Image: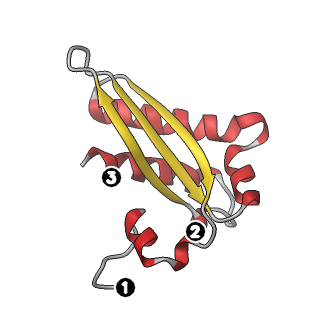
Amino acid sequence: PIEVLVEVFIREKILLNTRDEVPHSIGVQVEQIDVDPKTGFHRIWAVIYCERDSQKGIIIGKKGSLIKKMGTEARMDLQRLLGEQVHLDLTVKVKKNWRRDANQIRKFGYGDSAEL
């Protein structure tokens, strides 16, 4: 599904643009995708979850510069893949200790129910 591809592209941009302290503590979830049937324009809302406020600050960057950069990079990849215009709206939220919750791990696309 397209949601999985969006999440993968966003995770990739986080891995490529942040230091070692952040990537292992993030989860990405697409909340909504709207597609205009006439134009094919995709509007996508996604949330990046991290475990600490300090990680949230790193992901956002100074004056929002890093999240803007990562969002632009992910959007351009999605536009190439879909062949349509995309608007990607990213939000960062703190969800403490999400990696210790099996349901959250599955929700963010990590692991498999047989592994947990």
Q: Secondary structure at mark 3?
A: helix
Q: Secondary structure at mark 2?
A: helix
Quick one: quadrant of the C terminus?
A: bottom left
Amino acid at dot 3: Val
User: How far apart are labels 3 and 1 at the CA level?
Assistant: 20 Å
Q: Are marks 2 and 3 in contact (CB under 8 Å)?
A: no
Residue lying at 38% horizontally and 70% vertically, measured from the top left: 106
Amino acid at dot 1: Leu
Mark 2 or 3, nearer chain start? 3
Mark 2 or 1, nearer chain start? 2
Q: Are marks 2 and 1 in contact (CB under 8 Å)?
A: no
Residue 44 disc label: none
Asked whether, in this view, residue 91 is left or right of residue 57, the answer is left
Q: Is residue 22 above or below residue 47?
A: below
Residue lying at 37% horizontally and 36% vertically, measured from the top left: 78
Residue 79 x/y as whole percent:
36, 30
Residue 88 x/y as whole percent:
46, 33
Residue 95 x/y as whole percent:
60, 62
Asked whether, in this view, residue 63 is left or right of residue 82, the answer is right
Residue 24 disc label: 2
Quadrant location of residue 64?
top right
Residue 4 disc label: 3
* Residue topped by disc 1: 116
Quadrant location of residue 24?
bottom right
Residue lying at 47% horizontally and 43% vertically, measured from the top left: 46
Amino acid at dot 2: His
Q: Is residue 116 visible?
A: yes
Q: Is residue 14 above or below residue 108?
A: above
How is the protein colored in the picture?
Answer: secondary structure
Q: Secondary structure at mark 1?
A: loop
User: How far apart are labels 2 and 1 at the CA level?
Assistant: 18 Å
